[in-house]
Image: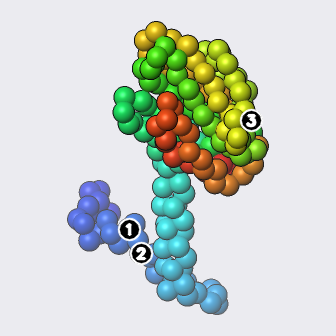
Amino acid sequence: KLNATPNCSPYHLFTFLYLMENVKSSLDIDEDPKLHRIGWLIQRAGWIILAVLVICGALGLFGSGVLSGKTLFENGTTVAFERFGRFGSPMELHVSTSSSNGSVKLAIPQHYFDDMELEKIVPEPMESRISEDHVIFTFVSDASIRATLYLKPKNRGRISTAVKVNDTSFNISHFIYP
């Protein structure tokens, strides 16, 4: 007689999910149930690792997303950038500040442009010049300004620099995946 109602106690559920049923057969086959259990545990660990990687990817660990974005704030100036990027994929650097004396100066070290290609700046700066080891962009505005630099990574790995906005320094760092 078959039991129509399965037993759903925690013990039976654990046995069903994590333990392999020992089957007695009359065939002459070498079976190692302990090895099967170990294989199943390794397989489940692999599934968990894959699930964690997919969730981290969806949150932005490997590109744009919640985990990737970082915002720095100091002296009324905000610098927002992506911490993680992909080689050759577009990235953005946002700078928001109020103007002092009608202008905003954004200074970026030249070595940063060895690793990142500047595609465009919105709005366009009134003046761009090279001074010592920095590229200085000057924006003219009576009130506040929000500038966006559209960048494309040229190298892989960690890219770090210090960006100056009106003499306030911000340390930014990206990790570029291949």
> Which residue occupies 65% across, 22% down?
121
Residue 50 x %, y %: 54, 57
Q: Indicate the amino acid at tag 2.
A: Leu
Mark 1: few/some/many CA within 10 Å (<14, 14-19, 20+): few
From where the camera sits, is residue 66 visible? no
Q: Is 94 drawn above or below residue 17 in the view shown?
A: above
Left or right of residue 113, residue 147 in this image:
left
Quadrant the N terminus occupies: bottom left
The label shown at residue 19 is 2
In this picture, residue 87 sits left or right of residue 10: right
Q: Is residue 101 visible?
A: yes
* First reached walking from the N terminus: tag 3 or tag 2: 2
Q: Is mark 2 on a helix, strand or loop?
A: loop
**Label 1 secondary element:** helix
Name the amino acid, label 3.
Glu
Question: Is 158 displayed left or right of 20 in the figure?
Answer: right
